[in-house]
Image: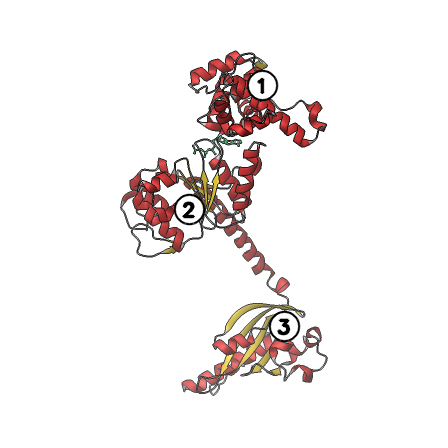
Amino acid sequence: MSPSLSAQLPTDVQSILTLAARSLFDVFANASEGMLLVDRSGRVVWINDQYRRYLPALGFSKESDFVGQPVSSVVQNTQMHQVIETGKPILVDLLTNQAGTFVVSRFPLRDEAGQVIGALGVVLFDQPQSNLQPLMSKFALMQRELDETRDALAAQRRSASGARQAKYSFASFVGASAAAAEVKRQARRTAQTHSPVLLLGETGTGKELLAHAIHAASTRSRGPLVSVNIAAVPETLLEAEFFGVAPGAFTGAERKGRDGKFKLADGGTLFLDEVGDMPLGIQAKLLRALQEGEIEPLGSNSLLPVDVRIVAATSRDLPALVRAGQFREDLFYRLHVLPVKVPALRERVQDIPALVEVLLEDICGRNGQVQPELSHEAMALLMGQGWRGNVRELRNVLEQLMVRTESAQVDVALVRSVLSDAGVDQIAPPASSSVPALPAPSGQATAPLWVQVAELERQAVQAALQGTGGNKVAAARQLGISRAKLYQCLGQNG
Ligand SMILES: Nc1ncnc2c1ncn2[C@@H]1O[C@H](COP(=O)(O)OP(=O)(O)OP(=O)(O)O)[C@@H](O)[C@H]1O
């Protein structure tokens, strides 16, 4: 039967709205899985028949024990009080409690004057896993695709910008000498804090390696590690490199804007290599970024918060630069919170055999070469050098050695020839009959540690003395110890 003409919509708006509200309520009441009403104070005043079946699961056997109670004490994780407080509906939400997981809607109820006088809760679905399965799996798929795309984009950005995960850990820092152990101990301690770290040491001593290791051992290890070699970036480009460029600030390639290293390192570590080479103008801006935790991209008038941990390194004498007015004193103190002095290779000659072993393994592995042995004299000669370029210079010499040898053993003559061609300054060329300062034979491994250490020290001092023709001052300097310590190592009292 078609609807009769008399069954038409009322003509005044108020009546239409009242009708619409009642109809909607009826639709919800019949099609939903349950409804509950609370008053202004959040007390349950009514539930419908469908809702009643959840009472046992909520821990109530009688409706009269449930109705009349504050909703937050009878329905775990309810958000009805939030709707009453804010007057805003929560159109779709997931509610999980001891009765299960539900898709729910919550609406404020208002009086004539617009005052919130209560709220209506509707259970739309009580088995979202099965009811909403197609929707949920589509959502999960899209979410997964979004995550994968985000990861791929972040990886692309990282490789394009120099941001990456740490390449080295503390285990990569080869050396068991007292000096090496001490620098590792200090660097490890800095990894546990959030303050800036300042790595001080000559070129090639492993400052960058330690910066990676500090990042890898810190709570930021999952974040990016971004490096800037300040000496390698022209002064005019440094500001954009650090702080980025706002869209539209420039024309051409920069039109779209670009993130700076600070932004790229957000949540991670920014390694500032050669910080002593930073121009004064940028120093002021860097100081502000460190103090305020905010940066201002070029051409933008707004400040961007960034959360970056700074590890800086320099081979220059920063206090001297401060005295000469080339480095800001306030920035120096800001960076000098956790200074770590990285020893020169000549201060830890005992580590040279282990370094040679690791570096040769790497070089030969890359070239597909069989790793040769170095004769004792050849090793002693390497241990007697000044190594102004430190581990990097040692590696270069070993690479050249590998190019020039085909034999299973490298002898002292070849090492001498490579050193002289490479222009390595021979601070202490040992006599060909020298006794190399090599680790104690394994037969001594059962002796108490202090005996073995003392023996190693004695051998190192003797090798250095032979290299300096008996000059104790030169030998002590070469070993990085005092003259008194040198005598002590020889078992003499100076
Ligand atoms: N203790 C070490 N163990 C193993 N390899 C090392 C060690 N120290 C340095 N190296 C290697 O020596 C090379 C130079 O090290 P790195 O770049 O970290 O030095 P740096 O002090 O940062 O130098 P620069 O100041 O010139 O930038 C790298 O190949 C590094 O892996």
Distance from disc 2 to disc 1, alpha carbons, whole Å, reads 41 Å
Asked if the residue under mark 3 is in contact with the one under mark 1, i.e. CB atoms within 8 Å, the reply is no
Sequence-first tag of 3 and 2: 3
Determine the secondary structure under disc 3: loop
- The residue tagged with tag 2: helix, strand or loop? helix
For label 3, count other residues whose C-alpha is less than 10 Å away and answer few (under 14), some (14-19) or many (20+).
some
Residue 478 lies, in percent from the top left, at 49, 25
Of residues 349 and 135, the one drawn nearer to the viewer in this rendering? 349
Q: CA distance from mark 3 to mark 2?
A: 51 Å
Direction from residue 73 to residue 15 in the image, left or right: left
Whether residues under marks 3 and 2 lie with C-beta atoms below 8 angstroms apart, the answer is no
Residue type marked 3? Gln
Residue under the point 70% across and 27% down:
445
Q: What amino acid type is highlighted by mark number 2?
A: Leu
* Inter-mark Cα distance, 1 to 3: 76 Å
Residue 340 visible: yes
Quadrant (top left/top right/bottom left/bottom right) for the C terminus: top right
Residue projecting furthest to the front: 493
Three-letter amino acid code at disc 1?
A: Pro
Mark nearest the camera among 2 and 1 is 1
The residue beneath circle 2 is 335
Where residue 31 sits in the image (x, y, percent)?
A: 59, 75
Q: Which mark is residue 436?
A: 1
For the residue pair 457 and 241, the one nearer the viewer reads as: 457
Query: Does residue 86 sit above or below 436 in this rendering?
Result: below
Q: Which residue is disc 3 drawn over?
A: 76
**Image coords of residue 18 (percent x, y):** 47, 85
Image vertical order of residue 331 relative to residue 136, above or below: above
Seen from the viewer's position, the closer of residues 320 and 388 is 320
Give the label, 3 or 2, closer to the camera.
2
| Label 3 C-beta lies within 8 Å of the nearest ligand 1 atom | no
Q: Residue at x 63, y 72 (%)?
A: 76
